[in-house]
Image (cartoon, rainbow, N blue to C red):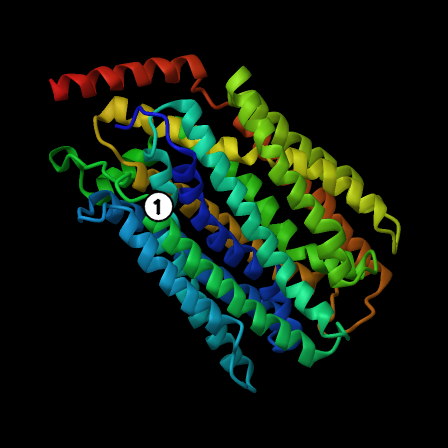
Amino acid sequence: MNHSKLKLPVKMGYGFAETGITAVQLFTQIYLLKYYTEIIGLNSSLAGIALSISVIWDAISDPLMGRISDQTKTRFGRRRPYIFIGGILLSISVLLLFSPPEISSQLGKFAYLLSVYLLVNTAMTVISVPHIALGGELSFERNERTSVFGWRLFFSNIGMLIGMIVPAAILQSLGDESAKENIITSRTVAGEIVSLVILVSSIITFLVTKGKDNVQADRSKQLPFFLSFGSVLKNKMFLILLFAFVIATIGRTFNSAIALYYYEYRLGLKESQVVINILLPFFVVLMLSIGFWVWISKRIGKKIPAFFGVFGLGLLTVIVYPLFPYGELRPPLIAAFFGGIFAGSILIMDSILTDVVDYDEYKTGEKREGLYFGIWKMGVKFSQAFGIAITGFLLDIIGFQNGVANQTQEVGFRLAIIFGPGVGFFFILGSVIFLFFPLTDAKHIQVQRILTKRTLKKIH
């Protein structure tokens, strides 16, 4: 149990892997559906099904990966080997995803997207679950944990910038942004860059965290996997936090999947305009807000800031996005500024989850960070699968026509309703559910004191 203050290079080195992980996630969330439907020519509903099946598999495998890493014992640690191996696998699979061969049939296109995206999500599970679990183990001190996850979110946002900006910047540099050949080239080259980022960032995290992955599990107290899985799902405290986060994540998935459609067909903005003038400022502000959220959570606790951050984001989304005028950048830019501030509160959720894991150890005597974070990510992946599948079907339902440059005004209005109230509803609902979370800061501090006494007794 690490009570010492972590050095800054260790915090940064740990968080660095999140650059590649998030670059892959955002690259696929923003560009994959649109690329396979409009460029590769796959039917929207089939694309949504393929992506959803892959994400569901990813969700199912997350708790298993968490349990495996909980029980792993090597000279490299129990989490770090998977960060190294997963980084290599994810790097290779991303290259394949955005470089599909020439396939004429809908079934063939569907099969290729499904099989390769399954590989991507398997690799994502191998690296991301042990990585986030390691973050909860680097320090036992609650403010240090918030700082660790703050650095994780910081590098996550750098990854978002890479996954979002690189494809658009390459496309813009090629000239005609509507030319199919240019779009294919931009996605292929961007895939190569993202592949390199995940490879380098995972290796650096593996090297910098050497000697910090030294928490050993007491196997005598470990329940069989399914019994342990079931006991976690009986933890009402965890379920409230998980349910709140899952609901909010559905909104995030809708937002990412529908964003380019909304800005292009509702506001008449080019991809490069959206990415550079709206999404880039959003993520820059989000990164700059992290220090504020870390500071305020130390001052007044974690629950109130987390609630108001997510609730504020939802309220903003519901109100403003249906109202933006056609062809203007300034209104969505202003919304991006305030949205970035509110969205920074998300780091507090991961930090609160480590508090729940402490409470579980206090009740059971077993350290199950991997399993908890695995189930956490499983819930998130199920919500992403739901969001992706519904997005594909909604595009068909609202009358969106693939490959048609000029959509009707009715389609644009419906996109605005989905992107505004449709997304914001989930943020608001998630924040309201979170109000029922029962673990107070005072109670968690008491739990940590008891765990510290237990550890000292074992030593002496």
Q: Quadrant of residue 445?
A: top left
Residue 385 seen from this side: yes
**What residue appears at the point 24 percent right and 38 percent down from the top-left corner?**
228
Quarter of the rendering occupied by the N terminus = top left
Nearest the eye: 77 or 184? 77
Q: In the picture provided, is 206 more to the left or to the right than 45? A: left
**What residue appears at the point 39 percent right and 42 percent down from the top-left corner?**
132
Nearest the eye: 137 or 265? 137
Q: Give the image location of residue 119, x and y in percent.
A: 40, 66
Nearest the eye: 460 or 425? 460
Q: In the picture provided, is 359 more to the left or to the right than 324? A: left
Q: Give the image location of residue 224, x and y in percent.
A: 18, 42
Quarter of the rendering occupied by the C terminus = top left
Q: In the picture provided, is 443 more to the left or to the right than 398? A: left
Give the structural element (helix, strand or loop) at label 1.
Answer: helix
**What residue appears at the point 87 percent right and 56 percent down from the top-left corner?**
327
Please name the residue that numbered disc 1 is placed on: 208
